[in-house]
Amino acid sequence: MKLMHSRSMRAFGAVLLMFYGAVALASEADRLVGRWSTKGDDATIEIYREGQLYHGRIVSISEPLYPEGHSSGRAGQPKMDRNNPDPAKRSQTIVGMGLLRGFEYTGENRWENGKIYNPRDGADYSCEITLNDNGTLDVRGYVGIPLLGSSQIWRPAAQ
């Protein structure tokens, strides 16, 4: 009887450790969640979690409207995703659109296996994100392998 009680206590302890480990990992992963300013404060991106994956959307841009005399003929109207390869999405406004999708936390302040959309050229790129020791993000978009890409540093946005 005593042996059985000891085994069940060890099993309970192991389950408890796994639970606390999962909670600690989730809170570590959620450090990505929040608002981030892109290079030059051109945009503010809100990163959020859905299930186990992280995504981001544009919540503001420095120049949200087309300027006077713009070739689109849309002066004073919200900027649209005009370079999207899907014609049905070209009427979507830049503010509010999804920019990041499908990132997984892989440990050691890294989120990988995601995609980043570039509204300037209408293309999706593979992407990885690293949280730096100084609290900034290194966001690296690439084609093929990370070595063949470019990075931007994003900083926490003023709330």
Image (cartoon, helix red, strand yellow):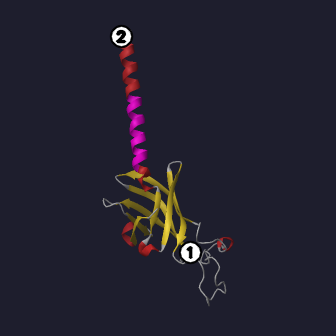
Q: Residue furthest left?
A: 133
Instruction: State how many labels appear.
Output: 2
For the N terminus, the image quarter is top left
| Residue 122 % position (x, y) | 56, 74
- Check disc 1 and report its element: helix, strand or loop: loop
Q: Earlier in the sequence, mark 1 or mark 2?
A: 2
Residue 122, label in figure? 1
Q: Amino acid at mark 2?
A: Lys
- Check disc 2 and report its element: helix, strand or loop: helix
> Which residue corresponds to mark 2?
2
Per the rendered image, the range of residues in magenta is 14-28
The 10 Å Cα crowd at callout 2, few under 14, some 14 to 19, many 20 or more, is: few
Residue 25 is inside the magenta segment = yes
Residue 75, label in figure? none
| Residue 131 % position (x, y) | 36, 59
Quarter of the rendering containing residue 76:
bottom right
Q: Residue furthest bottom?
A: 69
Q: Amino acid at mark 1?
A: Gly
Q: Main secondary structure of the magenta part?
A: helix
Give the residue displayed 40% in from the left and 19% down from the top. Answer: 8
| Residue 61 % position (x, y) | 53, 73
